[in-house]
Amino acid sequence: MRPPSLPVILISFLLFLTSLACSRTIQISMGSEPTATAPAPTAPAQAPTATTPPTAQPAATIPPTQTPLPPVVLKEFSLLFYPPLVMDYNQALWLDKTQYGDPNAYQTNFLQSASLESCRIGIQGPTEFPSMASETVQLGQVQYIRYLMGDGSGSNSAWYIENKSLPGYNYEAGLPIPFISSSLAEWDQCRQLGEAVLSTLSTPQ
């Protein structure tokens, strides 16, 4: 039998090497494990943001409705002992108790306080006062000589002799003498209210 020729040997050798290479490739392919894919990093969860409650707005303040004061209505109080003299008084504060038309109206010729039970403004007819302590006071445009007296029974009074300060008045009837009287408890307020009326003494225009 003839030995194989050189080309046949080379071809066989090449085939052998090729088969070895293929076997090696198959082993590598079978022995390698698939590479695990790392998961994509997840963004950290954000903590919930605290919601600030809305600030309560104060309710709008509605200013109280002011009740208008009633108008001051002045009336004239006639001094029957001393015509034609008059004094102005506020009808909300004083009541005219004079019984006009009565022959004895002089006896009721006074103003009664609407709020102070014992407080009144009266008119004294012409008279002379004994020597006693007095003081000169100016009430508005009118000047008086004031005598303060108490009757010892819990009441006070002040007598006001007008000191010839009224222009155009005829003093032949004597000096006008209004007076204020009240209980001790109401005296301070009564005197203040009364002197406001006495300051309006005048002759009608």
Image: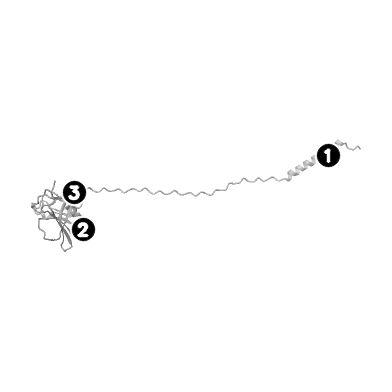
Q: CA distance from mark 1 to mark 3?
A: 149 Å
Residue drawn at (74%, 44%) of the image: 28
Residue 33 — which label? none
Can residue 195 be seen at all in this image of the molecule? yes
Q: Which residue is mark 1?
A: 13
Task: Report helix, strand or loop for mark 1.
Answer: helix
Label 1 vs label 3, nearer the camera: 3
Q: Is residue 48 above or below residue 158?
A: above
Q: Give the x, y percent position of residue 31.
A: 73, 46
To which residue does mark 2 refer? 188
**Amino acid type at mark 2:** Asp
Going by the picture, which residue comes out furthest to the right? 1
**How far apart are labels 2 and 1 at the CA level?**
148 Å
- Sequence-first tag of 2 and 1: 1
Residue denoted by label 3:
74
Instruction: Between residue 119 and residue 82, name the one nearer to us.
Output: 82
**Disc 2 vs disc 1: which is toward the camera?**
2
Q: Quick one: SS at disc 2?
A: helix
